[in-house]
Amino acid sequence: MFSAIPTDDLLIEKERRLIELLREWGRVAVAFSAGVDSTLVAKAAQLACGDRAVAVTAISPSLAAGELDEARQLAQQIGIRHRIIRTSEFVDPHYRANAGDRCYHCKSELYNRLDGLQAELEVDVIVNGANLDDRGDYRPGMQAAAEHAVRSPLIEAGFSKQDVRNLARQWGLPIWDKPAMPCLSSRIAYGVEVTEERVRRVDAAEQFLRQLCGLREFRVRLEANDLARIEVPVDLLPQLVLPETRAAIASRLRELGFRAVTLDLEGFRSGNLNTLLPIEMLTSSRPKTDLD
């Protein structure tokens, strides 16, 4: 049996459908980032396909510190084959330009690499961890997935983000409540060139804040002119403006090369840089699917 104690008939049906889909596809490679979505898909693929499934983690300068180690640990716990590859999106001038379609170029590089490895990996289908909620956000990477015939089993089985977390918890996956951890390049304001130095600086700043304040869900955004804009949940704002904490944060981020350090009074908002994009870009990014 692959199900935990039944608690929700609809979720049980989605679980059944997820396993059924992956079993039908047979030999599956999961684009595995160690986020809750791709971890759930990796677990489902292992249950459905056994050693015919493989989780593939891509590493590049945009991967936050600690994420690769977590991917290794999760793959071992799940019992799925695990392959690590390097991607080269930083050599692509379109990616570095950091226009609104940056994620498209990143995912195109990833899926091109996976396409070329299908024979070596002995798989027929590449799958990702996109869920239904992703369809309501600006996700240019979904267009790259469509172009490479990448399947989204969570979408096809009808999973929302909350469904993903609920089933991950039932299955005993330790990251069921892990906050979203998009790539480091997503912290850099559109129009500011993505460089390895800048993503390393953002990573170091976030590691510092995580250790100093025990933060889980937050962002250090790199804006034009090397300005750091820190977003934390609104209820945690008072913690960051305590005199000693504020001084420590400002000092460390200036050491890292930020010219100014600001605290966003509106608090943490996932993907809020997308609100600055032209409306025509936001409405044209999502490919049509059978679910439209």
Image (cartoon, grey):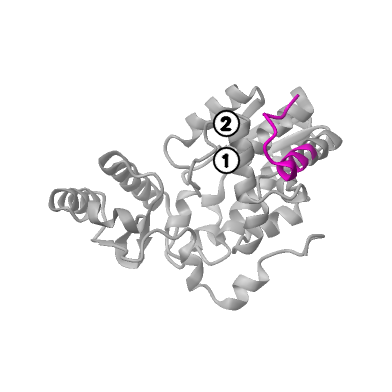
Q: Quadrant of the N terminus?
A: top right
Residue 80: percent from left, percent from top: 67, 25
In the image, what residue occupies the spot 48% across and 56% down? 186
Q: Quarter of the image holding residue 127?
A: top right
Which dot, 1 or 2, sits closer to the camera? 2
Image quadrant containing the C terminus: bottom right
- Judging by the rendered image, the residue that carries numbered circle 2 is 173
**Up/down of 223 relative to 124, above or below:** below
**Magenta residues?**
1-16
Amino acid under label 2? Leu
Q: 51 above or below 65?
A: above
**Residue 12 falls inside the magenta stretch:** yes
| Residue position marked by numbered label 1 in the rendering | 36
Disc number at residue 23?
A: none
The answer to whether residue 150 is left or right of residue 221 is right
Q: Nearer the viewer, residue 210 or 170?
A: 170
